[in-house]
Amino acid sequence: MKFSMIFEAQMTDPTAAHERQVLHDCVEQAVLADRMGFDTVWAVEHHGLKWYAHMSAPEIFLTWVAARTERIRIGHGVVCMPFNFNHPVRAAERAAMLDVLSGGRLELGAGRGATPVETSMCGVDPDRTYREVEEALRLIGTAWQDPDGEFSYHGELLDIDPHALLPRPVQLPHPPLYMACTKKDTLKLAADYGIGALVLGFAGVEEIAELRRIYDEAIAARTGARFVSTVVNDHFAALCPTIVLDDRDRAQQIGARGQRFFAQAIKHYYGAGPMPDEAVDPAVDELAAIRAAADEHVAYLHEAKIPVKSGATAIFNAEHAYGSPENAIAYVERLRAAGADEILCLIQMGTVPQEACLETIRHWGEKVIPHFRNK
């Protein structure tokens, strides 16, 4: 099983000064993760989501991290692949360049970046995003088949005559491919394409087990006709929100507060929720507050006459790897039993102080990861 971290560069008080600090803090965390034995550092790509993610140029962030680390793998989790975000040829060139400069450490995920804020900002047609992501994956999956670098592509949306696609990556035929899977349908698509799945699973271990079942069933049923590459990557990575401190109760409070902000930011941009609450009050019981936030969100949806779906409050579930190293080990054991091949640690959340992030990374490196490595 692999252990990784994923960065949104999320923040309260999204001023320019705080933004600069948070981005440098993320680099510091990634460098520590390399020393502590984590396998991969993943970075998202989002645009214009002020309270949710300032990671708008992950290729720059990951290059900076690669230059300051020695062994940890560097993951795009994910590149927004619709063409007006990133033309597939440019995405391929940047991926290959980073793979070369990092010594073959790149993991490459694809996604839609489909919030209205982002698509309107970059002129992306929401009705074309699925087709464009698939076309981009097919282009990258076949880009470096010729050892001399000659490349052509003739698909539904792109028609490219022979050119040299340079540089060529270290990992041939290409770095491992993945897709962000926030819906059951995209999970099935990842299986059909023969690529890895990066899933959320805030609702808890039971949801992870259900998503793994869907992925495995789609793998068993596929014919290979929709594979995007000659290499198959059936890898299932599951999100694991976590804060681990010497003080178990403080870790639970900081984790619940960070997740409450994270959940409210997601709802603001993805689910028509109000702006997230930025206040941090040490006197508040955050475990009770995150449950209250779920109730408030349902009330907001009712008031706005937005249908309340069955998973409307799933993201407010706080039963994750918050607490002591022993708590984290127990939760990861459950994720492993549910079928996770990789644990995507979500540590950097908007309200979580830097010292808590660094202490969490150290505890995982010294106690949690060795528990599973030694097995």
Image (cartoon, helix red, strand yellow):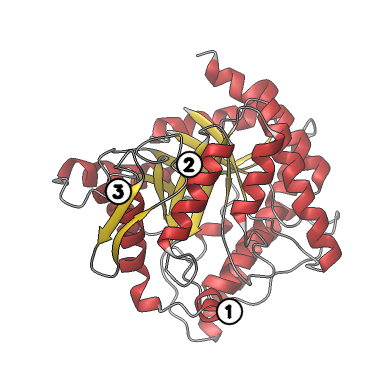
Number of marks in picture: 3
In the rendered structure, which disc, 1 or 3, sits on the residue that comes first in sequence? Answer: 3
Do labels 3 and 2 touch, CB within 8 Å? no
The correct choice, above or below, for 251 with respect to 129 in the image is above
Q: Which of labels 1 and 2 is toward the front?
A: 2
Can you identify the residue that label 1 sits on? 300
Residue in view at x 73 percent, y 29 percent: 362
Quarter occupied by residue 264? bottom right
| Residue 298: x %, y % from top left | 54, 73
Amino acid type shown at disc 1: Tyr
Q: How far separated are the C-alphas under marks 1 and 3?
A: 47 Å
Q: Is residue 130 left or right of residue 295?
A: left
In the rendered structure, which disc, 3 or 2, sits on the residue that comes first in sequence? Answer: 2
Label 1 CA crowd tier, 10 Å (few <14, some 14–19, many 20+): some
| Residue 207: x %, y % from top left | 41, 48
In the rendered structure, which disc, 1 or 2, sits on the residue that comes first in sequence? Answer: 2
Circle 2: element type = strand
| Nearer to us in this view, 214 or 163 | 163
Amino acid type shown at disc 3: Thr
Q: How far separated are the C-alphas under marks 3 and 2?
A: 16 Å
Amino acid type shown at disc 2: Glu
Label 2 CA crowd tier, 10 Å (few <14, some 14–19, many 20+): many
Can you identify the residue that label 2 sits on? 107
Can you identify the residue that label 3 sits on? 142
